[in-house]
Amino acid sequence: MSDEHQHDEDEAGEFLPPLDFSSIVFPFYTQALVKLGLMEDPLKKTAEGNLAFAKRLIDMLDLLKDRTKGNLNEEEEKFLESCLLQLKMNYMKQANLIKM
């Protein structure tokens, strides 16, 4: 992407997150929170759950973890593991598999 294109996006008022490993993980994480009903859907302005979709997003992050094993630095591994742990615990709670 050219600097000129990036500059245009900045002028349009769009936030450009840093381009790093977390920028791959974070959209899946936040979408899973929405599908778990723990975060409001920014487009619908409602919090509604879809456990099957949430599980699919968690499974996708698990797949990413498996496929990147040995290729991430310590900080990236911890970030991904933390996101997965939080999502899995909240999934189990929302699916009434555990009581918290």
Image: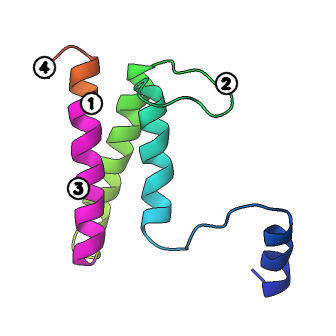
For image coordinates 46% across by 27% down, the residue present is: 35
Give the alpha-carbon distance from disc 1 to disc 4, as whole Å: 9 Å
- Magenta region, residue range: 73-90
Density class for disc 2 (Cα within 10 Å; few <14, some 14-19, many ≥20) is few
**Which residue is denoted by mark 4 in the rendering?**
98
How far across and how far down the image is residue 95, in percent? 26, 16
Q: Amino acid at mark 2?
A: Lys
Lower sequence index among marks 1 and 4: 1
Q: Is residue 95 magenta?
A: no
Give the alpha-carbon distance from disc 4 to disc 3, as whole Å: 20 Å
Q: Quadrant of the C terminus?
A: top left
Lower sequence index among marks 3 and 2: 2
Magenta span dominant secondary structure: helix
C-beta proximity under 8 Å, tags 3 and 2:
no
**Which residue is denoted by mark 1 in the rendering?**
90
How far across and how far down the image is residue 62, in percent? 29, 48
How far across and how far down the image is residue 44, in percent? 67, 24
For image coordinates 52% across by 21% down, the residue present is: 47
Q: Amino acid at mark 4?
A: Ile
Lower sequence index among marks 2 and 4: 2
Lower sequence index among marks 1 and 2: 2
Q: Is residue 46 above or below residue 4?
A: above
Secondary structure state at the residue bearing disc 4: loop
Marker count (numbered)? 4
Lower sequence index among marks 4 and 3: 3
Give the alpha-carbon distance from disc 1 to disc 2, as whole Å: 22 Å
For image coordinates 30% across by 58% down, the residue present is: 80
Density class for disc 1 (Cα within 10 Å; few <14, some 14-19, many ≥20) is many
Secondary structure state at the residue bearing disc 1: helix
How far across and how far down the image is residue 1, in percent? 75, 80
Give the alpha-carbon distance from disc 3 to disc 2, as whole Å: 29 Å
**Which residue is denoted by mark 2 in the rendering?**
44
